[in-house]
Image (cartoon, grey):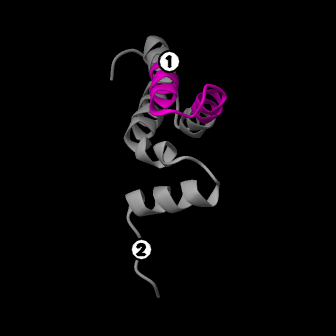
Amino acid sequence: MTEPISLEQWATELADALGLPPAAAESRQVILDVTRDAAHAISRPAAPIAAFLVGIAAGRDGATPEAIAAACKTATDLALAHGGEQ
């Protein structure tokens, strides 16, 4: 059995395998924050949907760290507006 890899390593390998820029893996904390906020403020199934839609929006807007942060902020703000502060 192989040892499990770290979340950081897995995200980096997945981004590379998908042909994404390094910023995609480096933004994992803001993605985790968005999914937490969506899961807590809306419902657990909202988390992967939020991550998916944030990814599409960030990609559309250039997949830069700034585009990722902006999409995450929009998703977090909307989730918290509907579910209240967590």
**Residue at (57%, 34%) from the top-left corner?**
63
Instruction: Name above or below for residue 82 compared with residue 36.
Output: above
Helix, strand or loop at mark 1: helix
What residue occupies the far top of the structure in this picture? 81
Residue carrying label 1? 74
Residue toward you, 24 or 53: 24
Q: Which residue is mark 2?
A: 4
Task: Describe residue 20's horizontal placement relative to residue 73 as left or right.
Answer: right
Residue closer to the observer: 12 or 72: 12
Q: Quadrant of residue 52?
A: top right
Label ID, residue 53: none
Image location (x, y in percent) of residue 16:
57, 58
Residue at 33%, 23% in the rendered image:
86
Residue located at (49% from left, 13% from top): 82
**Structural crowding at the residue carrying mark 2, measured as other residues with C-alpha within 10 Å and reported as few (<14), some (14–19) or many (≥20):** few
Residue 45 rendering spot, x and y as whole percentages: 58, 37
Where residue 53 sits, quadrant-wise, is top right
Q: Is residue 15 within the magenta segment?
A: no
Which residues fall within the magenta stretch?
Answer: 53-73
Identity, as a three-letter code, of the amino acid under mark 2 = Pro
Query: For the stretch drawn in magenta, what is the main secondary structure?
Result: helix
